[in-house]
Image (cartoon, rainbow, N blue to C red):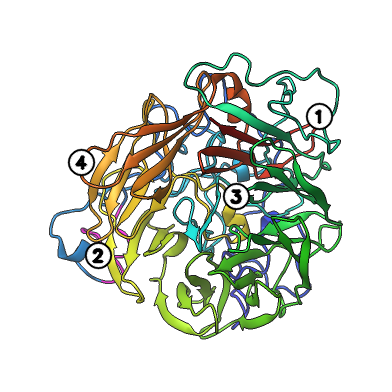
Amino acid sequence: MTQPPNQPPHGGYGSPQDPQQGAPQPPGQPPQMPGQPPQAPPPPAQTPPPPGQAPGTPPDAQPGYGYPQAPGPYNQPQQPGPYNQPGPYGQSQPGPYSQPGPYNQPGPYGQPQQPGPYGQPQYGYPPQQTYPGGPGAPGGAPGGRNPFKGKPGLVIAAAVAGLLLVGGTVWAVVGTGGGDDGKKKPEADKSTDPKPTASAPVNPGDGEGDGTAKPEDLNAGRQAGESKVLWYKEAPKVPGSGADAPGMWITDTVAVKAAYKEISGYTIEGGQPAWPTIKLPQKICAATQGKTSADKIIVAYKSGVSDSAKCNQVVEIDLTTGEKGWTEKLGEGALFDSALTINLSLVGDDTLVIGRSLSGVAYKASTGAEMFKIEKYGNACFPSAFTSGTKLLSVASCGAGTDTEHDEVKELDPATGKTKWTKKIPKGWKLARIYSLEPVVLYLTNEEKKQWNISTLKNGTDQVRSQVDVDEKFAPECGWAILDRALQGCLGVASDINTLYLPTEAKSGANEIVAINLETGKEKWRAKPTGDRTTLPLRVENGQLISYEPATYDQGGTVTSTPTGSGDHTPKKLLQNPAGTVKIERGFFSKAVDYVDGRFYISTTSLTSSSGQSKLMLAFGK
């Protein structure tokens, strides 16, 4: 059966609701597209990686994300792309993507059974294959799931470069997305480590510690040259369905974390409560990735406890004082326009876009006043994915179920909602991630041809400036933000105006970071980590590429800086985390990380039910 004309598409951006959410289908919904397999039931809790293997470190020589692929949509050789050019800007020699990808081979971590969302196994459902050239799964989560499997119209969520610096705001990069789907998700699992002392307190003065173990100093045994644990926090207990812990916001004085129904602020030096914990009536289901110049964020929480509860209660939070600001209830959309999950995008300093499954609404971030709507247009185009940062990009699925089905991306004026330019993505290709906004860098995939493409656009237009032409397997950690239509948030992607930085897949021990010239798409240089381990670029700051080398089984994580200009590209250690806390640091499987003013913060972004306390946040410094 074909889809009724002008009805909302069934997959990806514009999907009435994500099947992973587990909520009932709205009455009268058009039938599912033919050939779509049944959806998987809730996955179990995540199993930590085996000893001796760092999270995010794949075994030797496994095919995976970034594998050299067949030609992309912007005209790689041998098979002309949709734009009918012989190759990348007229090149006559075959490019690195003229080889078929390992579409039917094990995922990047070589697991025979492909896990479901957040790296957890599926029950009663065939194994899902990884997508060639696709961003990797969160660190510590073995394998990956093909987000296109059984979703013909899926335009998956995307990510932008590492930590974006917008309006003076540094954003924490997340390894996975959030979104209350009523299912168990992985977490920074229950710690069996002794509780820390005053030098690394557990929830001092807020009564959250379980009080069952004698406090022990996490800095005991710290070696010369190692950073110290500034403080360590444990998460609130959550129900069996689990809970989200989205976002992590760092100001000059406070580190703020959302978890379950709470928002807590801690002093950056000692981790003492900066203000009374904010208690919300229901689960937090969305939060802005960044904060305004006035150090304010916006979060959303559920309307109730049932599976059909909407994520429609929106509130502003002052990070400095811990006070609530304006509140708003997101209105109902048109038929099938679901608010079971939403996406909150902060654009510039005063535009908040709330994305439903088929539309968006823009508000003044400072007041909560409605500004404009972003709704269905053209040939049944349904916009429902939006960027945060310096530009407002909107991604729509158009003509789903018809011969003209395709995706479109637009740049909108964040003050008026008016279109600046529109780019039609060729049929068969999906806009999967947005790696950068300055300039715009698009990551595209083609399910049928098992191909991928990374293209940079010319500033202010829809014209292609260059395409990545590097024979390499790239492996950023993008988690499962696809389930919440988030376009940004990969851990391991960074960029500046002329260069894109991507991590390679670790084939045997260490990987590398490749700097790619965005003018030509060619490789500029490579940088290795400081040891036999993986490294992930975070952001570019003052001519230095800031990277994070995750903890291994016997060595704490390392924050490094690498010169981005000409000359030597040897990384320099900025912070070496202690070996004594690797068990805690490696336990954040679904994580957000940030390095601000010489301090490194790591926190979980998802919680599951536990009989004891679970890791929430850890801070290191000199």
Q: Name the residue under label 4.
A: 567
Question: From mark 3 to mark 4, how far is it between C-alphas?
Answer: 34 Å
As rendered, which of 597 and 620 lies closer to the eye?
A: 597
The answer to which of 544 and 96 lies nearer the viewer is: 544
Give the residues drawn in magenta, as a range. Answer: 70-83
Corner quadrant of residue 271: top right
Q: Distance between the residues labelled 3 and 2?
A: 52 Å
Give the mark nearer the N terminus: 1 vs 2. 2
Mark 4 element type: loop
At 50% from the left edge and 38% from the top edge, which residue is drawn?
Answer: 598
Does residue 309 appear to the left or right of 158 in the view shown? right
Secondary structure of the residue carrying tag 1 is loop
Residue 130 x/y as whole percent: 48, 45
Looking at numbered disc 4 in the image, what kind of residue is underneath it? Answer: Gly
- Residue 230 horizontal/vertical position (percent): 63, 31
Question: Residue type at mark 1?
Answer: Gly
In what element is the residue under mark 3?
loop
Q: Which of marks 4 and 1 is nearer the N terminus?
A: 4
In 3D space, how far apart are the residues under numbered discs 1 and 3 (Cα atoms)?
32 Å
**Would you call the spot at circle 2 few (<14 residues within 10 Å), some (14-19), or many (20 or more)?**
some
Residue at mark 1 to residue at mark 2: CA–CA distance: 57 Å
Q: Mark 2 points at which residue?
A: 80
Q: Which mark is residue 252?
A: 3
Give the foreground label among 3 and 4.
Answer: 3
Amino acid identity at mark 3: Asp
Lower sequence index among marks 4 and 2: 2
* Residue shown at 60% from the left, 23% from the top: 581
Q: Callout 3 environment at 10 Å: few (<14), some (14 to 19), or many (20+)?
A: few
Tell me the chief SS of the magenta region: loop
- To which residue does mark 1 refer? 612
